[in-house]
Image (spheres, rainbow, N blue to C red):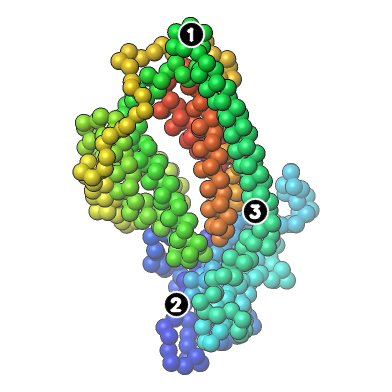
Amino acid sequence: MMVESVTWPPPASATSRRIKADRVGAERHKQRLGESIAGDRRETSPYEVSFQDDIEWRLLCKSTLGTKELTKFKEAIHNNYFFEMFVEDLPMWGYIGDFEDEDAILGEMEGSHTYLFPHLHFKIGTNKAQIVSVTVTTERDRRVDITNVQKPTTVQFSYSVEWFEDHELPWKMRMSRYADSRFLPGSFEIHWLSIINSFVLVLLLTAFLTIILMRVLKNDFSRYLELDDESLEEEESGWKLIHGDVFRFPEFPVLFCASVGTGVQLIVATFVLLGLALTGLISTTRRGSILAGLVVIYCLTCSIGSFVSTRLYFQMNGKAWVRCVLFTAGLFPAPVAVVFMWVNTIALAHGSTSALPFSTIFTIAAIYALIAFPLTVLGGIAAKNYASHDFNAPTRTTKVAREIPTEVPWYRSRFFQMIISGFLPFSAIYIELHYIFASMWGHQIYTLFGILLFAFILLIIVTSFISVALLYFQLAREDHRWWWSTFINAGMTGLFIYGYSF
């Protein structure tokens, strides 16, 4: 990926203003945290541009490409590789070549051609002596045929520059053009259709579950009120029989409480991140800013997760609250670190720029050690000293657990309920996921965070209703082990999202 990093000082007169660009090229640009996490590695380019100085044509270099170089260019062209350049932090994109007369399935055939674009045309817009817009285009008239990679080809790489006044775009709004051009015109209607589809699904699902549960519960209450205790024990079955077991605490309470606290923290961090993106406090058009903001916000919300997990642990009569705090501190970062080390090792082995440098890894580790972990400890201490430790269960828990029926219909099995609990919420957001994955893997700019926030709220609503409905059906079959099953059912959407990412 070719990247141009251009800087210039603000002199007094516009005529003397000059963009600095060394002809050496390939000098590493200073990276921000978000850019490093996103896998960007900016380097200076040999293009020399002077402020307000139009260039009709200028030779950059002349090179004879051998078989090895031509093969690399040809493979990149056929794989739709593109370059990304920056002028004053304004990105611009272009393809390095094109091909013609190729079959969509069979690929390259006899008579097809592959062309390299050696000439770039830069168009730079200014407003009050400030650069507000940049674009780069390629000229098909200057393209070079590189179909035959066995034949050495001499290529003249050149460029031209055109300056123009863009009075309609002020300096403060210069990034808005990317938001307007990258996603809105082509897919804004599709976004709204997907949201309307999801909203209708939520309404139908909510109405369906409400009607079913209310009618079922009404019938249950009417039957139970008409029977005495002896008749109930002899003739009835269902959730009424396990009132003495329903609030029995789950197995592995430390892990469960840490999981609940981590989930609450991630939900809060997501809402804060989307809110900051909507208000413009986090730049949505600057590459990597969302990832950097996510790292910082996660660290700042660690006290929330620790507070929730420790309070719930004390309500379950837990004594080893320090262990609960430590579990909460590492429950999410530890798996992420393991996956990161595996992926980063593979990236390093293949020489990919997506591999994070040691400086970025050290920075993230320092942020976690100096901010996230202390806040996690403070949240646990606050829950121990100030939060209520009373569980206040409406019924008493029996000393001996009731036996759980083993013979259940297949549609009431745990596996079937897990599939349903993951599929229905996923169906409400899968269209929006398509655009998110396209922006992540296509190096595009995603700006519709309002729609994303709405989709996230719909996801929470659908997941909540599904979890409540499945909880009732589980209790109706006299299975009082609902803590872990409900938690897993609510998280099954993540497994569907993981599968969809492939």
User: x, y (%) of residue 102?
Assistant: 75, 51
Q: Earlier in the sequence, mark 3 or mark 2?
A: 2
Q: Is residue 395 above or below residue 111?
A: above
Q: Nearer the viewer, residue 292 or 343?
A: 292
Q: Nearer the viewer, residue 115 or 308?
A: 308
- Which residue: 45% across, 52% down? 271
What crowding class fits label 3: few (fewer than 14 Cα within 10 Å), some (14-19), or many (20 or more)? some
Disc 3 versus disc 2: distance between alpha carbons?
37 Å
- Which residue: 48% across, 61% down? 277
What crowding class fits label 1: few (fewer than 14 Cα within 10 Å), some (14-19), or many (20 or more)? few
Q: Are circles 2 and 1 on residues that touch, CB within 8 Å?
A: no
User: x, y (%) of residue 72?
Assistant: 58, 54
Q: In the image, what residue type sits under mark 2?
A: Thr
- Which residue: 38% across, 67% down? 30
Q: Which residue is mark 3?
A: 191
Q: Earlier in the sequence, mark 1 or mark 3?
A: 3
Figure label count: 3
